[in-house]
Image (spheres, rainbow, N blue to C red):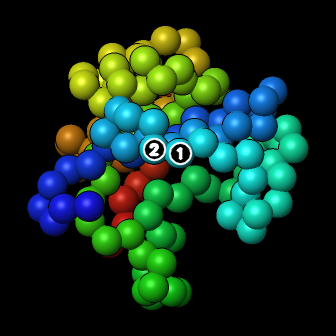
């Protein structure tokens, strides 16, 4: 990726087809049916947990090698896999805001307030 340039990343997972799709700047980059270790996804459900959701790295001091380099903006999470055309629309103008939107953090006001209306507020750490 180019330095000093925003890049839009999106990932969708369809449990029914065991398909993970990764998009860059609104375009499908890859489709996978295996996890990072090469094991079949096999219709695995996304695990639910009471642990906090962390974007970037929970503490760069714990392992600086895995800290996110750069900035994040406009993070959104849905309860369903968006279609390729919906991902492209998100890339162009962030327009998919239906009832499946579970969290939306713009960070525009310097906070991790959830703009989806679901109250999934967080906090920022340096």
Is residue 120 visible in the rendered image? The answer is no
Q: Quadrant of residue 46?
A: top right
Which quarter shows the N terminus?
A: bottom left
Q: Secondary structure at mark 2?
A: strand
In the displayed structure, 36 sits above or below 21; it is below
The residue carrying pointer 2 sits among few (fewer than 14), some (14 to 19) or many (20 or more) residues within 10 Å by Cα, namely few
Above or below — where is 92 with respect to 114? above
Q: Specify whether 42 is left or right of 23.
A: right
* x then y, percent, for residue 38: 76, 63
Q: Tell me what residue is drawn at x 46 percent, y 49 percent.
A: 122
**Which residue is farthest top?**
98
Q: Are marks 1 and 2 in contact (CB under 8 Å)?
A: yes
* Residue that badge 2 annotates: 29
Q: Is residue 12 left or right of residue 112?
A: right
Which residue is drawn at the image coordinates 65% and 36% (left, top)? Answer: 13
How many numbered marks does the figure carry?
2
* Residue 38 or residue 114, whichever sits in front: 38
* Residue farthest along the left direction in this orientation: 4
Where residue 26 sits: x, y (%)?
35, 33
Query: Pointer 1: what residue?
Result: 30
Residue 73 vs residue 118, the one in the foreground? 73
Residue at 51 percent across and 86 percent down: it is 63
- In this orientation, does residue 123 appear? yes
Instruction: Kindly state the secondary structure of the residue where label 1 is placed.
Output: strand
Q: Name the image quarter holding residue 117.
A: top left
């Amino acid at each position: 990726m180019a330095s000093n340039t925003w890049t839009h990343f999106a990932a969708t997972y369809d449990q029914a087809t065991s398909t993970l799709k990764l998009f860059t700047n609104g375009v499908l980059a890859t489709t996978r049916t295996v996890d990072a270790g090469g094991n079949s996804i096999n219709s695995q459900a996304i695990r639910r947990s009471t642990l906090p959701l962390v974007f970037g790295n929970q503490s760069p001091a714990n392992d600086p090698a895995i800290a996110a380099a750069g900035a994040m903006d406009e993070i959104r999470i849905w309860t369903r896999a968006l279609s390729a055309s919906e991902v492209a629309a998100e890339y162009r103008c962030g327009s998919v805001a239906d009832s499946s939107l579970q969290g939306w953090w713009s960070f525009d006001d310097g906070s991790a307030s959830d703009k989806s209306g679901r109250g999934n507020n967080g906090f920022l750490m340096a």
